[in-house]
Every structure is written in C-alpha cells, then in structure tokens.
Amino acid sequence: MSSYSYTESTTFTVTHARHMAAKIATDLKRMQRLYGQPYDWQITQFEEEAVAMMKAGYLADVTYGFKRNGQWIAPTLKYTARDLAGASAGDDDPGRVLPGKDISGATFGSFMNYSPAYFLLSDSEKTKFESGLPFQRTTGSEPTVNGYLASDRTYSAGGRALDRFSVRSY
C-alpha cells in the first residue's frame, strides 16, 4: 500500500509585493492621463508605500481618488488586501479606469487602513517601520462613498491578493 502527501508553501516576497504595487501604479498612471492627477512623484511614493505595507502584511485597504464634499466620487479606486490561505485568485491586467467622470470641485487624495498585524506592533516598532516609508500619513476619518463600490479587478501574487473596487455613481 502506498501513501502520498503533498504540501505547498508560498512565501510572500518583496518581488510579489512589487508585482502587485506596479499594477496599482499603472492604474494611477491611467487616472493621471484621464484626469491630470495623481502626479508622477505621488505615484512613485504610493507604489513604494504599497510595496512596504504589503511585504510587511500591514495593509488592510487603500483608496486613491477624488473627493468632493468629503465623499469619494468616481473615478476613485479602492484596493483591499487579503491572504489567499492556499486558494488561488486571478491576476488581472491593470487598467479600465472610468473615463469622462466629472471631477470639477474635487480634490485628489488617498486614505489607508492598516491590518490587525500593524496594531500588534509596539510604538517604537511602528515608528521604525514608518520612518522607512516615502511619506507619513496622518490619522483621520475615512471618507464615505458618493455612490457604491463595484469589484472589478483582482491582482495576486505569492499567496496574497488585492481586490480592486471602483466607485460608481447610482
């Protein structure tokens, strides 16, 4: 009688994080071409931040887009991180940022929520980690959405995924 066993282990590396962060940067570059923002230097910083946050496992979700009257409006994009726990997920191509949306009177911004792993760090560990980021975020309340979030892309690598949601109007 024969017995077989199969075990697979995936280690999430900086290469995996860069793969997914490059897709965020591509989405943001498309947003820039359509709407004038974010600027190149911001895209670079957002990409570096995303790599560090994903590699460390500290990213819960991050939103990039336009706010009017304190609410996210289309063409805002939200990325939610998740561990695939042995499952698989698609790795879509970036793009399909909605063109032709009215951003008059709106400002570009970003908001990040941290994973529970981040909150387990001591204050000194948080300070040390944050000192390596390209910019420092401040605390605040997450803006609401004017419309709804529609799931439209999944980016994955190394056993983790980013689910992308686009703000849509009712």
Image (cartoon, rainbow, N blue to C red):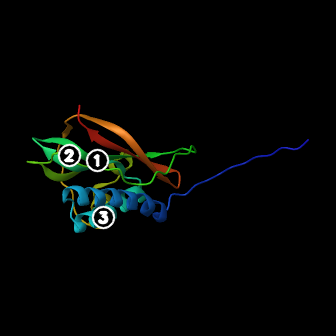
- Label 2 amino acid? Lys
Question: Which quarter of the image is occupied by the N terminus?
Answer: top right
Where residue 83 appears, x then y in whole percent? 48, 46
Where residue 140 appears, x then y in whole percent? 17, 46
Q: CA distance from mark 2 to mark 3?
A: 40 Å
Choose between 99 and 22: the one closer to the eye: 99
Q: Is 71 located above or below residue 40 in the figure? A: above
Identity of the residue drawn at 33% across and 56% down: 27
Residue that label 2 marks: 101
Residue that label 3 marks: 128
- Of the residues under marks 3 and 1, which one precedes in the sequence? 1
Residue that label 1 marks: 98
Which quarter of the figure has residue 167?
A: top left
Q: In this image, 29 relative to 21: left or right? A: left
- Label 3 amino acid? Lys
Determine whether label 2 and label 1 are within 8 Å by CB: yes
Where residue 54 appears, x then y in whole percent? 40, 56
Label 1: how many residues lie within 10 Å, few (<14), some (14-19) or many (20+)?
A: some
Q: CA distance from mark 3 to mark 1?
A: 38 Å
Determine whether label 3 and label 1 are within 8 Å by CB: no
Identity of the residue drawn at 39% across and 62% down: 22
Where residue 5 appears, x then y in whole percent? 76, 46
